[in-house]
Amino acid sequence: MAPLTLSAECRTLAHADGSPFFWLADTAWELLHCGTREDFRHYLDTRKAQGFNVVQTVQLGEINGLDEPNAYGHVPLAGDDVRTIRSEVLDLTRDLITMAAERNMVVALLPTWGCHVTGETHPLFRTPKLFDVESAAWYGAHLAATLGDLPNLVWVLGGDRPALPHADIWRAMAEPLHHTGHLLTYHPGGQQTSGDLHAEGWLDFHMVQSGHLETFNPAVLIRPEWDRSPAKPVLNGEPLYEHIPLGLDSRNPRSDANQCLDQWVRSLLAGSCGFTYGANEIWMMWTPDREPISPVVTPPFLGADTPWREALHLPGANLVAKVREYFFRDGFADRIPTEVNGEPALHFPRSGEVITYSAAMAALSV
């Protein structure tokens, strides 16, 4: 497959021939940290069969990412110096991306979780500051040289952090990555957008994170990015995860597939060019033997109770392809967010069709 690009209208991502690409991603932040190559195959085969076409994961993770060895016994760095990143770790990343390409899937790779740029003290995990402008430029260039020839990559900077006041570090990391010809975006914190970076030449499309409150309307993040000029595609890269305690509070009920569906539908009606699915036990690749994830957290972390191989089959994961089929119709690149009788709607000028919130929920709810 060829690298993704932008549609002529700059309202969607696109294949090399210009046809729209509907972003249907799964969140597997800890896959590279915890998984074996056999795990990669099982995970990718399952998600491919369910209709996913993108996997979001991270190279230097937040959950003990520097100190806990991966499945092959390797920590990523010798000390806290990114210039010592181990070739064995990047070989594993290359293998995952190659396996995804064999299944016609894209890997959206975060070079590092945002905590290692900001360096704030985390209450649960060791999150030292690893990057300044110089080391970020080196790291970006090293990843570009090591992985940039692979066709099925999208680079995602950030990782649950606002872009400011560290834009100079992100810019230094982004520049060599952008030269690989792959698209770049930025994953912000909860109820935040990448909008502060709109003027940056390296930011090809916007990402928002509506987060894990079932009452939050992602349209309030997506529509302002849709309305910016010049136009850039926008998508919800982290809506409500399935089976996660609402508000990330383990005392609260778990989210269900229909609550997640509400977030996906509201995102798409507001102009999102796809969406990212997430599940509580999948993003962290949870198994009972990983506990305790942190010595200061009473197991299980975020109430996890379903091993990740079982959690691959939660109801929401088997719903996403139906959502894509419902929304991804002729003229998707020309769609216009609107309202009909006071409710959110999406207009397709080419056909004259209109999708309303109530119609979508009636057609798709489980």
Image (tube, rainbow, N blue to C red):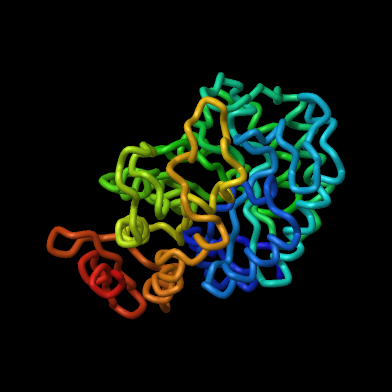
User: Is residue 324 shown above or below 281?
Assistant: below
- Is 273 situated above or below 192? below
Residue 163 relative to residue 154: left or right:
left
- Residue at 56% over, 19% down: 121
Q: Nearer the viewer, residue 229 or 254?
A: 254
Q: Residue at x 79, y 55 (%)?
A: 94
Q: Is residue 230 left or right of residue 110?
A: left
Q: Considering the image in quadrants, where does the N terminus appear?
A: bottom right
Tally of marks: 0
Q: Can I make out residue 231 in this image?
A: no
Task: Evaluate whether residue 255 shows in this view.
Answer: yes
Which residue ends up furthest to the left in the rendered image?
A: 341
Q: Is residue 107 left or right of residue 365?
A: right
Please state the horizontal and vertical placement of residue 50, each as a whole percent of the image: 52, 72
| Between 261 and 9, the one nearer to me in the picture | 261
Q: Quadrant of residue 136?
A: top right
Along the horizontal axis of the image, is 80 left or right of 286?
right
State the image coordinates of residue 133 (x, y, percent, origin top left).
71, 24
Residue 118's spot in the image, x, y percent?
59, 24
Rendering coords of residue 263 (x, y %): 33, 55
- Locate the C terminus and report the quarter of the image it occupies: bottom left
Residue found at x 63% / y 24%: 126
Residue closer to the observer: 112 or 301:
301
